[in-house]
Image: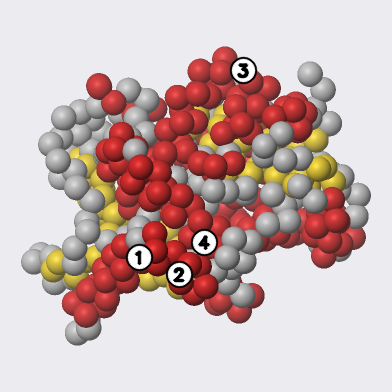
Amino acid sequence: MARDVDIVLFGASGFVGRLTAAHLAAHAPAGTRIVLAGRSRERLAAVARGLGPVAADWPLVVADASDEESLRTLAESTRVVVSTVGPYLRHGLPLVQACARAGTHYADLTGEVLFVRASIDTADEAARASGARIVHSCGFDSVPSDLAVLLAHEWAQAQDAGPLASATLEVLSARGGFSGGTVDSLRLQLDTARRDRRAQRLVGAPYALSPDRAHEPDLGRQPDVFRPHRREATGEWVAPFVMATYNTRVVRRSNALLDHAYGPRLRYAEVMAFSGRTAALRASAVTGVLAGLTGLLAVQPLRPLLDRLLPSPGTGPGERTRRTGHFRLRVDARTESGRRATVTVAAQGDPGYAATAVMLGQSALALALDGDRLPARAGVLTPATGIGFPLVNRLRHEGFTLDVAT
């Protein structure tokens, strides 16, 4: 089948779509064939004009997430589809399935357990048969987490230190905003879990995204952190990390897809870490804000009020917030032999938008251009198992820190 396009960016006129288009315009190698796709040709044309001469010849394609024929045509025309059209649970599955059938690589920004589980159940077999790499969560959800544990595993192998026994990601600092699309995705998952007890149990299951949940190791309870507490060993205070209930499932899926090469009994967790005299106060404040937002979104009568206060879909943080934002994460990894390494992942730019546009754009370029350097694997994958070290190298080239220290 002829593929006359390298990358189709679906949802290019949305908030994150525009940021990703700008990154591709600035960083894609000359000659990379890129198409902007979405529901409105006029809005796509406005995006292209804003990108300057480099995008003057980029084709514009009208396609709709609810029109399966347009999605099939889109998937069959390109090597890679990148989707920023969420909430993915509502809009994303037909495009994933079209790419899986067509043998087209795919990347997105989802942080939705229910959507990825549906993708695994309905598209993994077709993608493995066609050779498609369906790589979910190529942004702040869940590239830093997934690549950090991959790097810890590489270190353990190189040092002959044995399997990983534990790894804990700590958010040391992060600054940025949030968009209406993120709020909309959270709202939809909460509503779905409230109506469906099976979905509710799935969201809370540590191996929700496992390829074979029945054969995962029995490590007992692996609860996510929901309350602030002090670590006696270090004196640090830790609080819940809003993405932990998703990222931990992605890392566990990576381990399972690699036949538990990280470690058959690896325990993985994510928290926010605070130190200093105000650590307890800050940990409690973060916990309260997260609990309050989730609780309020779950109360239907309060939705109209919240909708007036929170960003609406298609909007997000301004240019200054995106430019001055940053994140710095640390993964403390320990092996079964008692060896220890620290993996640091950091970048300048709002984590969920400026930095995420880099991560998604570079994921797309890796899938389209890195060929034999990619892992020899197909199906519904993760950043570590679908792209792996080519993405590590690309992000380092873009100024990201991904370092291992002992």
- What percent of the width, then of the height, locates residue 362? 62, 49
Residue 134 visible to the viewer: yes
Which residue is the site of mark 1?
Answer: 296
Which residue is the site of mark 4?
Answer: 352
- What percent of the width, then of the height, locates residue 246? 37, 47
Disc 2 element? helix
Disc with the residue nearer the chain's start (3 vs 1): 3
Q: Amino acid at mark 1?
A: Leu
- Tell me the distance, in whole angstroms, between the alpha carbons under discs 3 and 4: 32 Å
Disc 1 element? helix
Q: Amino acid at mark 2?
A: Leu
Which label is found at residue 130?
3
Q: Residue at x 22, y 80 (%)?
A: 281
Above or below 20: residue 306: below
Disc with the residue nearer the chain's start (1 vs 2): 1
Disc 4 element? loop
Disc with the residue nearer the chain's start (3 vs 2): 3
Residue 347 visible to the viewer: no
Task: Give the number of the mark in front: 4 or 1.
Answer: 1
